[in-house]
Image (tube, coloured by chain):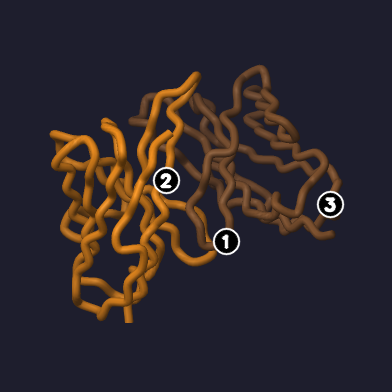
Chain colours: A orange, B brown
Amino acid sequence: SAVISQKPSRDICQRGTSLTIQCQVDSQVTMMFWYRQQPGQSLTLIATANQGSEATYESGFVIDKFPISRPNLTFSTLTVSNMSPEDSSIYLCSVAFLQGQGDEQYFGPGTRLTVT
Amino acid sequence: RKEVEQDPGPFNVPEGATVAFNCTYSNSASQSFFWYRQDCRKEPKLLMSVYSSGNEDGRFTAQLNRASQYISLLIRDSKLSDSATYLCVVQFSGGYNKLIFGAGTRLAVHP
């Protein structure tokens, strides 16, 4: 497993502004992921961020709205751009380790975003 | 049809009870399966990986039926601390470690 931290833990932002969320891991990992969990719902993958390559976005998510950086093997950022109240959600990063028969993912504590 | 389906619950059970959660998945190419636990306002934490032969970890037993595309989690001797939402998670083959999460089953264990 890994120790994963996120900053900020929570924020309240005005619509039209942008917020950058940081994810730091205590070990080097190839694959990092960004998820969104809207109130009362399960997790939805936004994008996969591999060091040294462009992030891969899931259907419904675009780079202009959610730009991602992955400058090294222990760090990534997700920016939520031009926010609207619909972006209010918990944003989580995760890392994957190959274990046994599958890739186990471990999550950061999340960033709780409220857009007013 | 959702890719991963779970009974949302809630399951309200007394301490000491045995409770079982079921999960079905739609993609027969799925290769790896997991159960995560999520406490209120916390991140999901990996509870168990699910292996083809089934596996047990203390009071928790996970089983996989590939023919029926069905996964289960059994909790014996429930504790108050087991109260949480249990997420069924499936990883599809040929992807890039992408996980598909079920909506979760809520468990409430009462004294």
- The residue singled out by tag 3 in the image is B15
Marks 1 and 2 belong to one chain: no
Q: CA distance from mark 1 to mark 3?
A: 19 Å
Q: Can you say which quadrant of the picture contains the C terminus of chain A?
A: bottom left
Residue depicted at 75% across the width and 40% down the height: B75
Question: Pointer 2: what residue?
Answer: A107
Residue at point 31%, 39% (across, down): A26
Secondary element under disc 3, as helix, strand or loop, is loop
Q: Quadrant of the N terminus of chain A?
A: top left
| Gap in angstroms between the C-alphas marked 2 and 3 | 29 Å
What x and y, as percent, mark residue B49? 56, 29
Residue pictured at 55% horizontal, 31% vertical: B33
Amino acid on which disc 3 is placed: Glu
Residue of label 1: B40
Image location of residue A22, percent across then percent down: 25, 54
Tell me the distance, in whole angstroms, between the alpha carbons under discs 1 and 2: 15 Å
Q: Could you say which disc has been placed on residue B10 in the image?
A: none
Circle 3 residues within 10 Å: few <14, some 14–19, many ≥20? some
Characterize the local packing of mark 1: few (<14), some (14-19) or many (20 or more) Cα atoms within 10 angstroms: few
Q: In the rendered structure, which amino acid carries the disc numbered 1?
A: Cys
Percent x, y for residue A44? Answer: 42, 51
Viewer-side residue, B66 vs B51:
B51
Helix, strand or loop for disc 2: strand
In the image, taking residue A1 as reference, residue A19 lies left or right, namely left
Q: Is residue B62 above or below residue B2?
A: above
- Disc 2 marks a residue whose amino acid type is Phe
For the residues beneath circles 1 and 3, the answer to whether they share a chain is yes
The first of marks 1 and 3 along the sequence is: 3
Q: Secondary structure at mark 1?
A: loop
User: Considering only vertical position in the picture, is B71 above or below B54?
Assistant: below
- Chain bearing mark 3: B
Residue at image x 36%, y 45%? A4
